[in-house]
Structures are given as structure tokens and as C-alpha cells.
Amino acid sequence: PGGPERYAPKPEPDIPGATDTTDLQCQYNSPFGQNSMCCGWRPHFNWVVGTCERNSKIPNATFCDGVPSCAREPQINYAAAYQYNGTHFIMQDASTAGDISSSGVAGSFKDKTGWESVKSNFKWEGGEGDWPTKYAPWGGVEGPRGLTPPAALWVLSVDSFYYGTLYMLSQLTLNAQGHKEHNNCWEWEFDAIEGLLGTVPKGSALPGNLNQLYVTATAQVTGCMPMPGTAQQGNGRGHNFTEPKSFERFCHQNPSAVGCKPWTAEGAKIWHGGGHQGTDRFENLENTPYVFAVVLDRNGFWVYRWRPDETGATGWPGISQTSAARVLPSQPRRILDPRGLKTDVSGDTPEAVILIPSLLPEAACTRSSPERADFRWGASALGSMGYEMKDYKPGEKLQGAQNWWAHFVDTHQLQDYPLSIAGVPADAEKALYSCNKREGFGRQCSCKYGGGSRRLGFLEALEAGPHFDVAMMLRKMLR
């Protein structure tokens, strides 16, 4: 008991058009924390929502220690998962948290429907001490299949999500940990939005405000699905633009655009893999509705965020603040607001998209070329060769060497967008932050103002620094 036959989802597709993953076993894994169930794991992925809702079993979770009350009060309407069938995204009931019907999913935090009425069914075993309360679709062989190639879509609708996380793990990991198996093949993770408090030592400042949630593809990376680093690294430290290949035409036509000269100093400051070093982040304001949609396809991860209009509608037909249709078109309407066509998205931006580019076989070889041939980069290069030579299947010469990106399809999310959606230089947006130090959360994180990356006034700057007493004295004098 506890072997892969107990926790691994079935490789056979559950809807027409989904990929049979039988031949996509990954056998080139990290040497750390291995478990026999990990050998031959397949590309089945699903969502996790992590919050700072209190949990007596994990009272001092590192990502929530000392946060203000607004960071502990998420207001979620529903979460949904969709498998692509080649033309449309089809809702997967077992991986959707809300009021499910023949037309789709619905939910309203205000009315205590949807997420609020079913979230207890999705409680997921924590134990790592990071986020105290977690939710995910999990089970076993007969449980959720997770989402696979040819493409996937996850949707999260919230009325307030000042701080928290939405991330993806393998369905195998979700199932195993749900059954309290903590040595569970943590071989892969994608963070669509995540607060970073738990990543910095106590006493150190966050890279941004508490409510700036980061997109990160490098928390845990498998050689079977390699991820980029900086723009410079993704282009093999060469002196011409080659990756992301889908932007070659754009950079040819706009050679001076952000990101189109990765060999310059700027290229070392643009993080295509996201994370705290870069600017791939969304600022979330308190008591502000947002709808997030995360697409995984051949070109990478596309993380969308909309502020619903007065009717609750978003830019994706069929997705609204309180409901999502069972069948969705393959892409939303084009993002037009220029504030949403670059990373470092402010809380009041009505529509935005951030891209984490994929590394298809040729790109994976380019990215691997300056690196050591270890379990990550050696496996990445081997996976590229395995795919190109068709030797990755069981019984073949390079069985288990994979580039899973090559098995996804293009769902045409790229709609004449600039390369700045994949990153702007890390020093492009410099600001004094009002809510980036744990010891000041109770004073500076005034959630009603959003705690945003606005520049501080004179007194606020004093309060945020070591001169809090001086600032208070001056405030009293002014009054």
C-alpha cells in the first residue's frame, strides 16, 4: 500500500481529445527525497489554494506569521478546472469547487454559496508549515485525473484575496499528501500567485509589499518540463534573440522593445521564470473582486487577472465573478489596457496577463547548453533528444527522458502582445514600500488603502523606517 498504483491518476483520457499519458513517464527526477512512487510519474496537474485562515495545528505558519487580519480573510466565490479537448476547455467536475450544474459552476461568497458551501470537501493535508490552511482536489486512482496535455485551464474567482496563494502540483503529489504521505514526489510546482512572506528570514524586508503576489515557475522544476531563468540565460547567453520563439517576429519588428536584447545588462534583470528576483507579480487590493485564469499550453503559463465589470463579466466569454460555463472558448478577448501588458501589475488594473514562457526541445537545449549536466539540465537536454528522436517511450533507448512541453498545443493566447508580458527589468519599478516588513505589518499595512506600491509620503516613510516615534510626534504636533 502506498505505491504508485494507489496514488497515481489513470493515464487514459476521461474525455475525447485529452492526451493518453501512458508513454509520458518521467524517469529522470531529482535525487532528493525520492520515493519509489515517483519513478515514471506523468504530467497530470491540479490546483492548490493556500490561505492564512487560522489552523490550530500550524499556529505559526511561516507564510502567515504576523500578517494583518485582512490577510487572513479570503473571500472566494469558486475554483474551477478545465481540460482542453483540441477546440474548447471542458470543465472537470471532480476538480471544481463550487455549485456544479449542467451549465457549469457558480458561487458567491456574499451568499455563502459555491466555494463556501463545499470547501470542506477540498481540505488538503498541510504539514510543511508554510500555509496553515490548504484546499485541493485529491483522492486516489478513482479520484480526480488532474489536467494533462494538450492544454489546461484553472479559474479562481474572489471577492477579496489580499494575500494568499494559488499554485499547481502534480495530481500524484496531491493524492499522496492527501493520504498523509509526505514523501510524495514534490518534483514540480507552478505558483500562479503567491505571497512571499515565508521565503524571507525574520527581520528582512520583502521584495515588495505583502499584497504583491508573485508568479513563480522555479520553486521546484523537473527536467521533464524545464523552465527558463533570466532572458539572458534563455537565449544561451548568445548575442541574438532566439527565445521565446513566439516573439521572434515581434522583436524583429521592435528591436528596442523591452526584452528584445537579452544579451545586454537588461537581459540579466528580466526573469522569464518569475520569482522574487523579478517583477512577475500582481498587487491585490482588499475587498476588491478579481478573477484569475491560468492557462497551461505549448507556449507556457498564461496568468490572467480581471476586475469584473458592474455586471460581473470578465474578458473571457463564459467566465464571470459568480459563475463559469461548462464549456469555454479557447482564449479570452485580447487584453487592451497597456497597464496589463507588462509585469508588475497594480491592484487597480482592470485586465492583465503575465506569461512564463515554455522551453520546447530546441529552447531547452539552448537553455541547458551553459549549465552542468546534472539531474535538472542533463535531464532537460536528454528529454529534448528523446522527443526529437522519438525514443522517449517505454522500451525505447531513452525511455523516461521527456520534454512534456512538446506534447501541449498552442491555444492561441498570444494576441499581438509585447514581450513585456514575460517580464520587465527588476529595477524598472523602484518604490518605497509601505507594507514589506513583518515588524511593521500592524502599523503600515492599512488594508483599506491596498498596501500598494505607492510612494510614501514624508511621514509614512518615517513610519516605515526606524523613526516611527519621530513620525508619531510630528503627527501629534500637526494635529
Image (tube, rainbow, N blue to C red):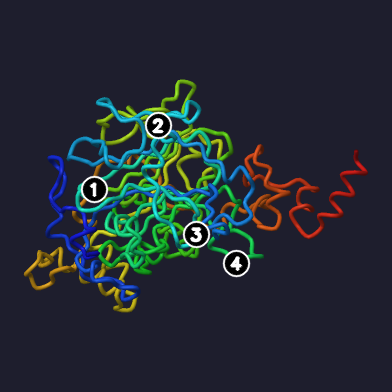
Q: Is residue 130 above or below residue 410?
A: below
Q: For marks 4 and 1, give the one nearer the viewer.
A: 1
Q: Is residue 109 above or below residue 55?
A: above
User: From mark 3 to mark 1, how far is it between C-alphas?
Assistant: 26 Å
User: Pointer 1: what residue?
Assistant: 143
Tell me what residue is drawn at x 25 percent, y 39 percent: 92
Q: Is residue 340 above or below residue 257?
A: above
User: Pointer 4: what residue?
Assistant: 201
User: From mark 2 to mark 1, how far is it between C-alphas?
Assistant: 20 Å
Q: Quadrant of residue 183?
A: bottom left
| Amino acid type of the residue that numbered disc 2 sits on in the rendered structure | Gly
Pick whichever of labels 4 and 1 is earlier in the sequence: 1
User: Pointer 2: what residue?
Assistant: 114
Q: Which of these two is toward me, 176 or 457?
A: 176
Tell me what residue is drawn at x 15 percent, y 53 percent: 11
| Amino acid type of the residue that numbered disc 3 sits on in the rendered structure | Asp
Residue 130 disc label: 3
Label 4–label 3 contact, CB within 8 A:
no
Pick whichever of labels 3 and 1 is earlier in the sequence: 3
The answer to whether residue 241 is seen in the rendering is: no
For the C terminus, give its image quadrant: top right
User: From mark 4 to mark 3, how far is it between C-alphas?
Assistant: 13 Å
| Amino acid type of the residue that numbered disc 1 sits on in the rendered structure | Gly
- Pinpoint residue 338: horizontal percent, then vertical percent: 48, 38
| Amino acid type of the residue that numbered disc 4 sits on in the rendered structure | Pro
User: Which residue is outermost to the top?
Assistant: 311
User: From mark 4 to mark 1, how far is it between C-alphas?
Assistant: 38 Å
Pick whichever of labels 2 and 1 is earlier in the sequence: 2
For the N terminus, give its image quadrant: bottom left
Q: For marks 2 and 4, give the one nearer the viewer.
A: 2
- Pinpoint residue 100: horizontal percent, then vertical percent: 31, 30
